[in-house]
Amino acid sequence: MKTKVFVAKSIPLEVKEYLGQYCDYRIWDSEEAVPRELLMEEVRDIDGLLATSSDKIDEELLRKAPRLKVVSNIAVGYNNFNLEAMKARKVIGTNTPFVLDETVADLVFGLILSSARRICELDRYVKEGKWLKRIDESLFGLDVHHTTLGIIGMGRIGEKIAQRAKLGFSMDVLYYNRTRKSEVENSLGIEYSEMDELLKKADFVVLMTPLTPQTKKMIGERELNLMKRTAIFINASRGETVDEGALLQALQEKKILAAALDVYEQEPVDTQSPLLQLSNVVMMPHIGSATAKTRFDMAMRGARNLVLALSGEVPPNLVEELK
Ligand code: DGY
């Protein structure tokens, strides 16, 4: 008998065909987040769940899913996992690292460039018919090349960002991480820095750390106050790593120059959020890994992790804490 699986988001046809060879699956074939009540119903008889990082896997859900053996996230982040509860129930969890590293690093560089050179703002300026004379300094931006980039969180994506900064833009790169990465320091020529020093020195601060109880709201008023008034803050990790109220205030009061955000405390972002009114903020809809190829690779990797785990093998992307 085939194992039973629920898929909590739409996936490409080829991935469906692959899954169908091994499992009986039901699918929430939509880009809207699956409603919690429906997810709770769907998990009652399943062995495996193909999930997104917005589907909370907590004690309540695990209680409703007595047969559940594996939750395979189609995401590198797994802040939706209650790791203790999963461990206690012996439910394993997997994610999709590697396939998205370069894609997210590309987006981060897009955010750096568009905020420094005001690309989105000036695109609107031209399209709204405001370009009626020679440009003057009110439209000037900041250089990216030969400046200092501070990366908070030196995982695989952090490394790819550092590589682009060093090789493509001749930037000095400082990084802060829980553990020092001497090999990366040597191979890329980047420098470890304590967090406060990094915040004081960097022209661009990129937050690229996973969301954990330790990193929740790690950037708040104190940290933003340490940054240069000319600095730009970029967040492509998770919205909850930042105190969004403090960031809004820092931008409104021009304590920092600008921000570029891919992630928010609430997603989709509140249509009434005051951030939407600020011209010094570039906002993207949590799209860091969203190219057609990478999203396909993530879905296929998620499906493979699930199938391997359900057939009793150790999937390659078992999350560290559940090994
Ligand atoms: C990830 O893979 O974690 C992306 O942020 C999408 O959730």
Image (cartoon, rainbow, N blue to C red):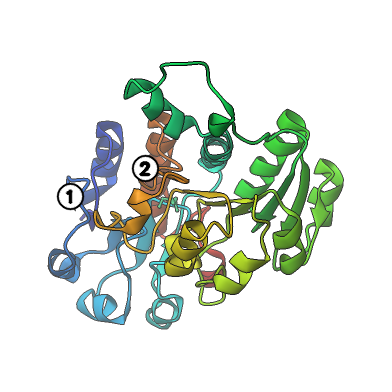
> Taking the image as drawn, is residue 82 in sight?
yes
Q: Which amino acid does label 1 sit on?
A: Ile
Q: Residue 123 carries which label?
A: none
Residue drawn at (59%, 30%) of the image? 137
Q: Where is residue 323 in the image (x, y as percent from the top left)?
A: 55, 69
Residue drawn at (53%, 30%) of the image? 139
Sequence-earlier tag: 1 or 2: 1
Disc 1 from disc 2: Cα separation = 13 Å
**Quick check: 276 above or below 160?**
below
The residue lying toward the viewer, choosing from 68 and 153, is 153
Q: What residue type is labelled 2?
A: Ala
Q: Is residue 232 left or right of residue 191?
A: left
Dot 2: within a 10 Å radius of its alpha carbon, few (fewer than 14), some, or many (20 or more) residues? many
Q: Where is residue 282 in the image (x, y as percent from the top left)?
A: 44, 43
Q: For the residue labelled by badge 2, is the local secondary structure a helix, a strand or a loop? A: helix
Q: Residue 299 carries which label?
A: 2
Quarter of the figure with residue 197: bottom right
Q: In this view, does 30 lie to the left or right of 135?
A: left
Q: Where is residue 12 in the image (x, y as percent from the top left)?
A: 28, 35
Label 1 CB less than 8 angstroms from ligand 1:
no
Quarter of the figure with residue 195: bottom right
> Taking the image as drawn, is residue 179 in sight?
no
**Quick check: 149 above or below 319?**
above
Q: For the residue labelled by badge 1, is the local secondary structure a helix, a strand or a loop? A: strand
Residue drawn at (56%, 67%) of the image? 219
The residue lying toward the viewer, choosing from 118 and 32, is 118
Q: Is residue 267 left or right of residue 260?
A: left
Q: In this view, does 259 lie to the left or right of 39?
A: right
Quadrant including the N terminus = bottom left
The residue lying toward the viewer, choosing from 257 and 323, is 257
